[in-house]
Image: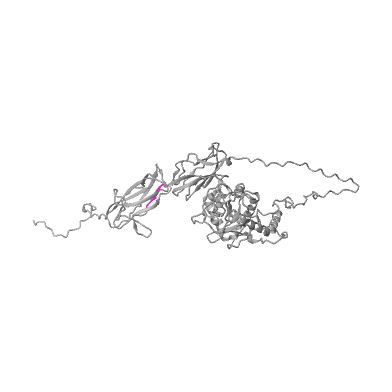
């Protein structure tokens, strides 16, 4: 902890100089309408993002991050060097909208991936390290950042080399990628990891709700259980592959777990140090002294100062001058080795056809792609990413929208089984080569409605009603498909004129809408998990007769149900012959017509 404290003091001392250098360096490569904040993070006006293919696997592309650590609860803090930095209870405060986004993301992941055990404090820790909680909570009421948060371009100059993958749509840079937004996603990762966290119909890396939910899904992939330390470490390192990053995030995670509170948007504490700041290495030795590059002429511990001869006793012979070293030939640079990925020229469909499935079913065929050289030779040991794109809830087994698979000796990679969701229609699965920019290969897939090939009533009671009354029994049916119960099948119920005339009837029985008005066609009905459906109550107008209710489903199932509306039968008159024995007949009041004797 002493080393950490020393590190924070060093970072505070160089902040002003570093900020000026970073701003100047970034300004030289900024696109129009881009500005940089005091920490070298660029800001721009908002632009509408569009997803693109991905060729990288890291969330941030190992971009720079903020290195500030949580405050130390030390009764005797070390003296401050340079301008003091406020480090107190404000460090535990999280801007209201940002905090709300983290908690909503945790709630959604608890529902979607309960086995992941994602704590919102982990999102807060990463948000702190990546953007200082969206620059201290500078967001609007919908969670959009007030200007984009953009990291340095990843041009290989001190950072990873990631050439542009989104035509500058997200980061305003058409040459190289930059990490974007409060959770600092690179555009290529956002293309498959992006989620709509605020239900506005789009996924935007500059919206804290979208970014937090996307980060949650990213950390919960690969079946990781974040309550297990090893999986937690793997997830964090997959976000930014650095041990220092891991330790920094874990420090903030522990800090937020001990307690935090909500503060107004825009009032959060801004970080100071960054991982790309110049200066000594943050690594420390056992004594707490900083170990890193030394100034020219500074001797290492226990060594003599360079260019100073050692002292000799009087009268002793002078030491011999040192023998000059023999000239050495310059070492040639090591030869570049070409990896299998470097030889890939294009992807080919490895035989996938007819990607169609009923909603909720697993696609019968798996998607496969083959990596080939320019000459058409297969390339093994190449990682292929399959990404589900479009307005669909279809996903690979386990609920993931992305899967990475290594090609076999024949150059073929087979994606996990694809499972259709409840949304019907067409969507795309795109295959791309990880680590190489080649054209993606698209597969068109279609989800069709759930079907039933048979409908039957669950009872056989006659359905009758008097004019102006209501039917005592509700119609209940069961849908099946190939003999098995057909769940979630859409059913349409229509009161038709006759078996031969499917036109909607304008008289006789009817249903009621929400306002109590008569309706004779119902749509949007669906069977339950057992394939059962109970229709709403039926009513009758003053028209008598026999009527027909027709039920239909996708898949061709049809059922006609007969309904009768008739006046109630009159009660029969009592029959004297059925009167009980021993009763005295009622004397007649009619005069007798019998002739007199």
Instruction: Give the main secondary structure of the magenta stretch.
Output: strand
Quadrant into which the C terminus falls: bottom left
* Residue displayed at 56% across by 42% down: 383
Residue 353 in percent (x, y) is at 46, 41
Residue 8 in percent (x, y) is at 69, 56
Residue 174 in percent (x, y) is at 56, 52
Q: Is residue 271 left or right of residue 425?
A: right
Residue 261 in sight here: no
Residue farthest left in this picture: 597
Quadrant into which the N terminus falls: bottom right
Nearer to the camera, 340 or 268 = 340
Specify start and end residues of the magenta stretch as a single range.
531-535
Residue 56 in percent (x, y) is at 57, 47
Q: Is residue 537 left or right of residue 122?
A: left
Q: Is residue 544 left or right of residue 99?
A: left
Residue 553 in sight here: yes
Nearer to the camera, 360 or 325 = 325
């Amino acid at each position: 902890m002493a080393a950490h404290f020393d590190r924070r003091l060093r970072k505070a001392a160089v902040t002003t100089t570093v900020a000026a250098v970073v701003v100047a360096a970034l300004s030289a490569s900024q696109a129009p309408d881009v500005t940089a904040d005091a920490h070298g993070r660029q800001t721009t006006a908002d632009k509408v993002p569009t997803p693109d293919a991905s060729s990288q696997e890291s969330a941030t592309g190992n971009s720079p991050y903020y290195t500030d650590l949580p405050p130390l609860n030390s009764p005797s803090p070390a003296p401050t060097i340079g301008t003091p930095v406020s480090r107190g209870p404000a460090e535990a405060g999280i801007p209201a909208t940002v905090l709300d986004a983290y908690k909503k993301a945790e709630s959604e992941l608890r529902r979607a991936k309960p086995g992941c055990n994602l704590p919102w404090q982990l999102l807060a820790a990463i948000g702190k390290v990546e953007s200082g909680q969206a620059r201290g909570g500078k967001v609007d009421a919908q969670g959009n950042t007030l200007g984009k948060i953009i990291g340095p371009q990843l041009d290989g100059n001190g950072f990873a080399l990631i050439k542009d993958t989104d035509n500058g749509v997200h980061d305003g840079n058409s040459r190289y990628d930059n990490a974007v937004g409060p959770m600092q996603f690179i555009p290529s990762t956002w293309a498959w990891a992006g989620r709509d966290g605020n239900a506005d119909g789009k996924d935007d890396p500059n919206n804290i709700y979208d970014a937090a939910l996307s980060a949650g899904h990213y950390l919960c992939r690969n079946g990781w259980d974040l309550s297990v330390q090893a999986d937690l470490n793997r997830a964090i390192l997959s976000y930014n592959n650095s041990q220092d990053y891991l330790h920094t995030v874990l420090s903030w995670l522990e800090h937020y777990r001990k307690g935090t509170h909500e503060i107004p948007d825009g009032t959060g504490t801004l970080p100071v140090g960054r991982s790309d700041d110049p200066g000594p290495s943050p690594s420390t030795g056992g004594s707490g002294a900083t170990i890193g590059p030394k100034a020219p002429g500074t001797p290492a511990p226990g060594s003599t100062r360079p260019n100073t001869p050692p002292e000799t006793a009087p009268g002793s012979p002078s030491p011999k001058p040192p023998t000059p070293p023999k000239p050495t030939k310059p070492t040639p640079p090591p030869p570049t080795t070409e990896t299998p990925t470097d030889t890939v020229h294009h992807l080919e469909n490895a035989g996938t056809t007819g990607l169609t499935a009923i909603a909720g079913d697993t696609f019968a065929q798996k998607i496969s792609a083959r990596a080939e050289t320019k000459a058409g030779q297969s390339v093994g040991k190449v990682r292929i990413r399959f990404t589900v794109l479009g307005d669909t809830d279809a996903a690979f087994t386990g609920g993931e929208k992305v899967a990475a698979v290594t090609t076999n000796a024949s150059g073929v990679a087979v994606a996990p089984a694809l499972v259709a969701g409840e949304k019907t229609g067409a969507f795309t699965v795109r295959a791309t080569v990880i680590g190489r920019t080649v054209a993606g290969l698209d597969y068109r897939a279609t989800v069709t409605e759930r079907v039933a090939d048979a409908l039957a009533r669950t009872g056989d009671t006659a359905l009758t009603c008097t004019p102006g009354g209501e039917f005592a029994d509700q119609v209940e049916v069961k849908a099946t498909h190939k003999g098995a119960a057909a769940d979630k099948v859409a059913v349409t119920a229509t009161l038709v004129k006759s078996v031969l005339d499917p036109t909607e009837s304008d008289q006789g029985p009817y249903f009621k809408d929400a306002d109590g008005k008569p309706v004779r066609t119902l749509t949007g009905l669906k069977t339950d998990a057992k394939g059962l459906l109970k229709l709403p109550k039926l009513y009758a107008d003053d028209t008598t007769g026999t009527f027909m209710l027709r039920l239909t489903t996708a898949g061709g199932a049809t059922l006609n149900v007969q309904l009768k509306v008739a006046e109630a039968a009159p009660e029969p008159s009592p029959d004297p012959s059925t009167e009980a024995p021993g009763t005295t007949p009622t004397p007649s009041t009619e005069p007798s017509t019998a002739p007199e004797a």
